[in-house]
Amino acid sequence: MNNSAIKEIAFQLGADVCGIAGIDRFAKTPEGFHPADVFPQTESVIIFGKPFVRSVFKAKSNAPYTLVRNMLIQKIDEISLRMAERIEEEGFDAVPIPSSEPYEFWDALKRHGRGILSMKHAAELAGLGHIGRNTLLINREYGNRLWLGAVLTGIALESDQPADTACPPDCRICLDACPMDALDGTTIDQKRCRQICQTSTEGGGWLLSCNLCREKCPFSRV
């Protein structure tokens, strides 16, 4: 299988973007979160995504945003599983990666969690965009609205070229918009963020109650 065949599968399954990064691009990945720490036979990482509906950022309620986010998780995880199945049918190994939880790493003191693979960093290495000051992946076509998934495979594929997108050099809209001062332009203080980003409703449900770092960024309207 080659890059074109892999991407054709991704698009057939419903992905809107797809990029590929060879294992050599992950040399600086922290120990424990390297693709080979998850699947030692990894030769390539396939990253794909679907965008949020742009109009949810115009809604006065965050309930639509929460709905879209939850549905995107389901859709992306479904694509991951189906892609892994298709690759295995061709005789190659493929391991789907959860697009959200469960976390295997959790720092209770800092309320800081990490997935087994950083999707946004993998997407940046696969040429799908760059990581902005709001710590979100910014893609040329879909801005910061992508939800990402990944499959690790034993197929040695050609890495895609890095993207040429970038935040404007003096832009700090996301930093100034954050009510918790959780952003410093490079990382996010998850403990501060989590204090307000999710709330419980009286009916026993929950709501993603703050998405200003995504909403206020000009790339949310791309």
Image (cartoon, rainbow, N blue to C red):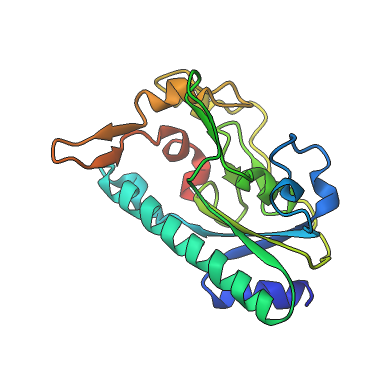
Residue depicted at 74% across the width and 49% down the height: 125
| Vertical arrangement, residue 215 with respect to residue 110, above or below | below
Residue depicted at 31% across the width and 52% down the height: 67
Q: Residue furthest bottom?
A: 90
User: Does residue 49 appear anywhere in the picture?
Assistant: yes
**Position in image of residue 68 (x %, y %):** 36, 54
Using residue 12 as the reference point, say whether residue 45 is left or right of it. right
Residue depicted at 72% across the width and 54% down the height: 39
Q: In terms of depth relative to the viewer, which is nearer, 115 or 209?
A: 115
Using residue 140 as the reference point, say whether residue 36 is left or right of it. right
**Position in image of residue 173 (x %, y %):** 50, 28
Picture quarter containing residue 201? Answer: top left
| Vertical arrangement, residue 7 with respect to residue 24, above or below | below
Using residue 178 as the reference point, say whether residue 97 is left or right of it. right
**Position in image of residue 74 (x %, y %):** 42, 60
Please give the count of numbered marks on the rendered protein.
0
- Quadrant including the N terminus: bottom right
Q: In terms of depth relative to the viewer, which is nearer, 40 or 203?
A: 40
| Vertical arrangement, residue 6 with respect to residue 162, above or below | below
**Position in image of residue 14 (x %, y %):** 51, 71
User: Does residue 15 appear anywhere in the picture?
Assistant: no
Q: In terms of depth relative to the viewer, which is nearer, 52 or 109?
A: 109
Residue depicted at 61% across the width and 25% down the height: 185
Q: In terms of depth relative to the viewer, which is nearer, 50 or 139?
A: 50
